[in-house]
Amino acid sequence: MSRILVTGSTGFVGSALCSWLVSEGYDVQGISRRELPYYQRSTDSLQKNDVIVHTAAIAHRLNESGVDPIDEYRQVNRDLPLQLAKAAAKAGARRFIFLSTIKVLGEGDNKPYTEQSVPAPEGAYAISKWEAEQVLLELGRTSSIDVVILRPSLVYGPGVKGNLRQLIRVVAKGIPLPFGAVNNRRDFLSIYNLCDVIRDCIDKPVGGKTLLLADGESISTTRLMSLIAQHLGRPNRLVPVPVSLMRFFAMLVGKSEVANRLLGDFEIDVAYTKQSLDWKPRWTVDESFQKMLSVPTARIDGE
């Protein structure tokens, strides 16, 4: 059984992954992002690990230090994993699994993203992740370490933050919401399916590949809110307001980007990932939300 090092082990994904891998019988060591600069200098420590799963990153950073934000993103999201991967290769690790983001392909398209889609990252976070992918894959081509790139869709599960957390809070209040006529198609990824696919990437021959990750089941914003209400035991009070009207009002108040996330399409074709790993998502979206919202800490402070 492989010895696994998980970086970012105190974060949303990293902490769930450590628990998952331990339950699967792996020997796991977790370190936080702040420990990384010190840890990667210790070749002795790295020699004990067969596989490194790098989840540590910054996604949101205010420019409080006077440092150019893109430089800070690059330092943490590109340079730090490259330094760690080089040290791991020198120490004899066989695989480096890098958690990137589907956002390296863009913020949505009129057709599903595939492994053939041309990257079009927007913003410092996505740009730094795309640059990290390139330098890590080059390291994989020129050294003995296998590099695997994972591009997950928006990940949800107990402890989720950001826009989805806010959405759950609003739905939990049981107030009427104007999303009853939204027939868009968006792909998400449950933390349970993410941990499951990472486990496969640890053991299966996928070195050098870039894999897109999602639950494999596109749902609309209407369906998403209905699932949240159902598994929170809250009334489903969705009012069918025309999408064009909602977009118009969002534009008036400067919230067009938010409206895009709620009303637009964002689909991911995971056929290549399934074929490469001989894998299929173990949990449906319905089952994943049920598992997520049955955890008391995941029910959010809107009840």
Image (cartoon, rainbow, N blue to C red):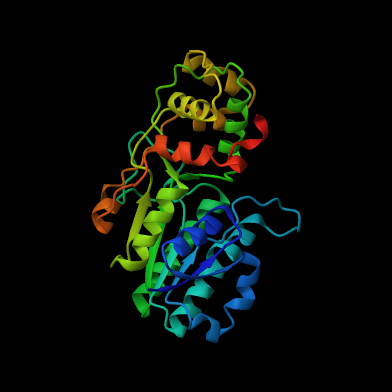
Q: Quadrant of the C terminus?
A: top right
Residue 231 screen position, x and y as percent: 50, 30
Question: Which residue occupies the foreground of this view, 244 or 220?
Answer: 220
Q: How many marks?
A: 0
Q: Residue at x 37, y 73 (%)?
A: 1
- 295 vs 35, left or right, is left
For residue 180, above or below residue 262: above
Question: Which residue occupies the foreground of this view, 13 or 59?
Answer: 13
Q: Residue at x 34, y 47 (%)?
A: 282
For residue 66, above or below residue 271: below
Residue 129 screen position, x and y as percent: 50, 57
For residue 242, above or below residue 27: above
Indicate the quadrant where residue 69 lies: bottom right
Indicate the quadrant where residue 267 lies: top left
Residue 202 screen position, x and y as percent: 37, 66
- Look at the image and tell me whether residue 254 can be seen: yes
Residue 205 screen position, x and y as percent: 28, 68
For residue 264, above or below residue 216: above
Question: Which residue occupies the foreground of this view, 74 or 194?
Answer: 194
- Look at the image and tell me whether residue 266 can be seen: no
The residue furthest bottom is: 44
